[in-house]
Amino acid sequence: MMMREGQATAIHRQDYAPPAYWIDTVELTFDLDPAKTRVLNKMRLRRNPQVPAQALRLDGEELNLARVLVNGAGTSFKMDGGQLVLENLPEGDEPFELEIFTTCAPDKNTQLSGLYVSEGTFFTQCEAQGFRRITYFLDRPDVMATYSVLLRADKAAYPVLLSNGNLVESGELEDGRHFARWHDPHRKPSYLFALVAGKLVAREQKIKSRSGAEHLLQVWVRAGDLHKTEHAMNSLMASIAWDEARFGLPLDLERFMIVATSDFNMGAMENKGLNIFNTKYVLASPATATDTDFAHIESVVGHEYFHNWTGNRVTCRDWFQLSLKEGLTVFRDQEFSMDMAGSPSARAVKRIEDVRVLRTVQFPEDAGPQAHPVRPDSYVEINNFYTVTIYEKGAEVVRMQHNLVGREGFARGMKLYFERHDGQAVTCDDFAQAMADANPDSELARRLDQFKRWYSQAGTPRVRAEGSYDAQSQIYTLTLSQSCAPTPGQPDKQPFVIPVALGLLAPDGRALPLQLEGEPEAGATERTVVLAEARQSLRFVNVPEPPVPSLLRGFSAPVLLECDYSDEDLLLMLAHDGDAFNRWEAGQRLMLRAALRQLGADDSKPAGPLLPPALVEALRAVLNHPQLDPAFKDLVLTVPSETYIAEQLDEVDPQRIHALREAMRLELATALRGDWAAAWEAHRDTGAYRPDPLSAGRRALAGTALAMLCLAACQEGDPVWPGKAYQRFKDAGNMTDRFNALSALVVCGHELAQPALERFHALFRGDALVIDKWFALQASAPDRGGRALPAVRQLMQHPDFQLRNPNRARSVVFSYCNANPGGFHRADGAGYAFWAEQVLALDALNPQVAARLARSLDRWARLAEPYRAAARAAIERVAGHDGLSNDVREVVTRALG
Ligand code: 0A1
Ligand code: ZN
């Protein structure tokens, strides 16, 4: 059993106090051994003159302390709640030297925080508070020091020794050991420290930046994986070029390294000069990775690289400011992916995909028991606050600032931010202030205090729009109002500053020039208005016909928009809106409306078709459209997810929603059968594999077409399309096409699915990332009368399954609990009982991963009976368990409210 510290209490943002000591330099010496690694930590410290004299309290966790020396001599110390407390330190402002000698056991570290071993290689993960599991330290982001690191290890077992910064020396030692000495010239907080030691090989690339400086780029992987690193390296080079071109931010290191590990709690980590990545976001070849994998690699490599400025050069004062680096860096990686995608249509596709994530994951978070502001006020376990609110909503908050000051203004704001804060640990307020100060005439500067409510108030605002047209005066009045539901601890909300990008469409779909009352002449056909009051009216003049308002274009603010559109209005937007986002949105609204209509009906069996004929025809027109981008078509023809439908309801019957969505998909499959067949034929061949958005979009549409055709065929017992899918599965020249074909067979439940799955496993046995896909596909496969859960239990008996590897746990357990609503929400509660069992099993190994799984039942209180009672019982079972980690305890306590 793992050791648990006592029950942790909440930490509050308002309690922030600067550290009592500064650490200027750190010299670390590691004698690496999986069972017992020795760590000598020699620091130069000094008292912070701004803080009253007090004891030095160093954080530590699961360390064995051997010795403490102050200026070379032994000293007294005491332990207090895991902290090492030194009271008899030299008086005065002079720096002093502190030496701490500890040992730790990396091979017992299943939490993957601190120093751990994965497949025989040492890795570290220090964000947020892993450094204290390596040595005693002031483990907080506002303490920034210069690090020198000496690594010593057996040379045969650990031929490669890496740490942050530059390699200054390396050589042989006695007994087959060797050493490497690294020095990082940049001051950094402890959470950015990293070391790697093991058998690895690197793809290398030398580049020259604009200033003429030379840099060495390396991507380190296990020997057999080198051929899968080309895309990651290309993505890294593109990221470096992009940050320099778009923001004038150069690479500030001689050497930049990425290392891949198959045991990692998250996606990747931005350690200074030594990024450590989950293999999932590094390794790709056409034969083993899908288009989605390629796109994720580009964006995660970009994300970690962009942190070098937004996170590392300027870091967070405390963890409440996490979104300062994460929201901004997600915004930057989203912009990078859009700029890389190129065409306006490919940009829109990326925007729609990002908004889909926001709405299906972040909106529920913001409406549930774990809702918290982008800058939280308190937490128990910081690792639980790496949330979609901090990341994705945080990025939307940055995007709104971008929209309010414009592209150039935003670049000016970034410049000022770095001029003011380079080398500092700062707050979200500092960022917004720099943006506003660099753009004094902007709406952001005018309303800065009010704008900052986006950082302090949780919850998704609801915007209501009502229009009225007066034919006589040719005036169109648009009234916008806003409200925001209470969230935990925040019963009342003040109005937000909401940028609303809008246009008006004439009944024939033309975009009307916009002229507000009082303006001398008509302007452009799109503009952004700012809703800052609870209710505001806009009067558009010279409007010749009753218009359809196209609101919140490009999803200009993270809000729920309500507008009483008629079906005809939405069909008009779907056919003609000049804003691709709203064109897609119109289709989604129509499908959602059809779903809600049926869910509101007493009878669960629909009398007629679920999708109105006019909608089917409109979707057909999109599918057959000669100009539209295939990726965009694919998004339009995707029925809103079950989670998104559920979010619209006060009481959720997940089985009913599941059955309804499946029925809608089947209708779409059958009604458009000929069109799907044509789409398949037109898009099935994409030539030699390239992961660019255009060819990826063609493959995506072909994949959906094949899935739809199999769905319709299986329903009717027609063997032709499943046969074609099997053929495609066998012959495919890349993983995207192969996996789409396999998935089509599994989803429609055809008997060819089983031989295909077996063949797939045999083909890719030993390739962990591909086997993860194999597991995930089966764990999320349709329930078919209660078969999903037994299938999942059986998968967990498979020799390739192991709970302690986070990717594998995610591929089976998380896929079932989070991506298989029809299989998970069982009336007998067995899905929830399984969830409780797995949360507890995982918690004994890895609390961070367990706490993420614990979030699957966040929205239990909205479930209809019998689901609600069963879910509550399962959460209570977890909550009542002895020895729960703080991570899981915090999640289930909040869930039970
Ligand atoms: N900062 C990383 C994500 C990350 C966060 C926490 C971790 O361990 C608790 C690991 C990685 C990023 O944003 O990419
Ligand atoms: Zn990040």
Image: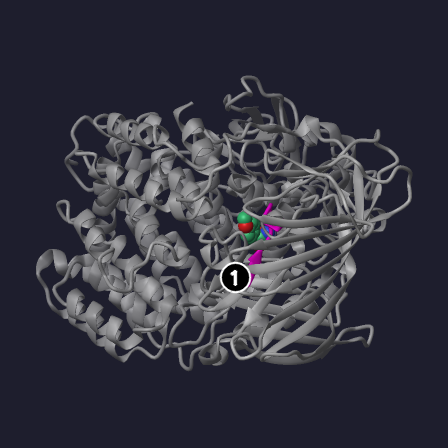
Task: Residue lying at the far front in this picture: please name it.
Answer: 74
Q: Position of residue 275 (x, y in %)?
A: 61, 63
Query: Left of 756 or right of it: where is 564?
Result: right
Quadrant in which the N terminus is drawn: top left
Which stretch is magenta? 123-131
Foreground residue among 784 and 435: 784
Using residue 449 as the reference point, say whether residue 623 is left or right of it: left
Whether residue 777 is visible here, answered yes or no, is yes
User: Was residue 127 drawn as part of the magenta stretch in this picture?
Assistant: yes
From the top left corner, tell me how far across and down residue 307 is, in percent. Answer: 66, 56
Disc 1 is placed on an element classified as helix
Tell me: residue 230, above or below residue 338: below
Looking at the image, can residue 412 be seen?
Answer: no
Q: Tell me if 69 is positioned left or right of 766 in this view.
A: right
Residue 859 vs 64, above or below: the answer is above
Tell me which corner region of the image, top left, top right, bottom left or bottom right, holds residue 725. Answer: bottom left
The answer to whether residue 380 is magenta is no
Q: Nearer the viewer, residue 642 or 804?
A: 804
Residue to which mark 1 is pinned: 346
Mark 1: few/some/many CA within 10 Å (<14, 14-19, 20+): many
Looking at the rendered image, the quarter that the C terminus falls into is top left
- Report the number of discs: 1
Q: Amino acid at mark 1?
A: Ala
Instruction: Identify which residue, 642 or 711, lies in the foreground.
Output: 642
Q: Residue at x 20, y 63 (%)?
A: 745
* Mark 1 CB within 8 Å of ligand 2: no
**Residue plotted at (18% across, 34% down):** 827
